[in-house]
Image: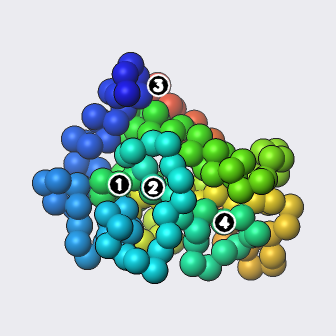
Amino acid sequence: MAGPEAAGAAAAEGSGAGNGGRDGYDGKCVFCRIARREEPSTALLPCEDEDLVCFRDIKPGAPHHYLVVPVKHMGNCKTLKTEHIPLVKRMMEVGKAVLQKNNFSDLNDVRMGFHWPPFCSIAHLHLHVLAPASQLGFLSRIYYRINSYWFITAEQLIERLQNENAAS
């Protein structure tokens, strides 16, 4: 990895944004254990980014519902800073690639985002990738609602992080 992505990854690792331990691992965190393949009941999907893992959500809200998670423990989306924008973008790219590998090609019918604290069930950064968004069930339309105070799309998070940088 080179260029701005490397800088973003280095910043994400060293920012203290919810690091579990010194090595970025929290043995109490289920997503840390999944990322290290310590949860045999959770199958990891092929992912071309060694710093991220992807797997199916255990409570799918759409026919395709995946989670993209950093291998190293990071706090929720509210702990992110401007230097984490490349990480969020990489998470989105992994989500799109997984959808395409699973025969979903209409990337205009996808919802990607994060639950905003305190509405996070797991305190490890994770991107929800749902498709087709047009087929979200009643409860899923509420849980993953755009412009709500409990869910933020990946694009909205990037915009918020960019605005924080412009304001400082």
Q: Compare residues 63 and 139 and report the one nearer the observer.
A: 63
Which is in the foreground here, disc 1 or disc 3?
1
Earlier sequence position, callout 2 versus callout 4: 2
What is the spatial separation of the Cα atoms under label 2 and label 4, in whole angstroms? 14 Å
Which residue is at a point 66% across and 75% down the rendered structure image? 60
Inspect the image, locate mark 3, and give the three-letter code of the amino acid beneath it.
Ala
Q: Quadrant of residue 140 in the image?
A: bottom right
Q: Give the numbered dot on residue 71.
A: 1
Inspect the image, locate mark 4, and give the three-letter code of the amino acid beneath it.
His
What residue is disc 3 on?
Answer: 166
Instruction: Identify the secondary structure beneath mark 2.
Output: strand
Inspect the image, locate mark 1, and give the three-letter code of the amino acid beneath it.
Val
Which residue is at a point 23% across and 72% down the rendered structure image? 27
Q: From where the camera sits, is residue 142 visible? A: no
Q: Compare residues 74 and 62 and report the one nearer the observer.
A: 62
Which is in the foreground here, disc 2 or disc 4?
2
Is residue 118 shown above or below 99? below
What is the spatial separation of the Cα atoms under label 4 and label 3, in whole angstroms? 33 Å
| Residue 9 location (% of width, % of height) | 34, 36
| Residue 158 location (% of width, % of height) | 54, 38
Task: Report if the CB atoms under discs 3 and 2 are less than 8 Å apart.
Answer: no
Q: Give the numbered dot on residue 53.
A: 2
Q: From where the camera sits, is residue 113 visible? A: yes
Earlier sequence position, callout 4 versus callout 1: 4
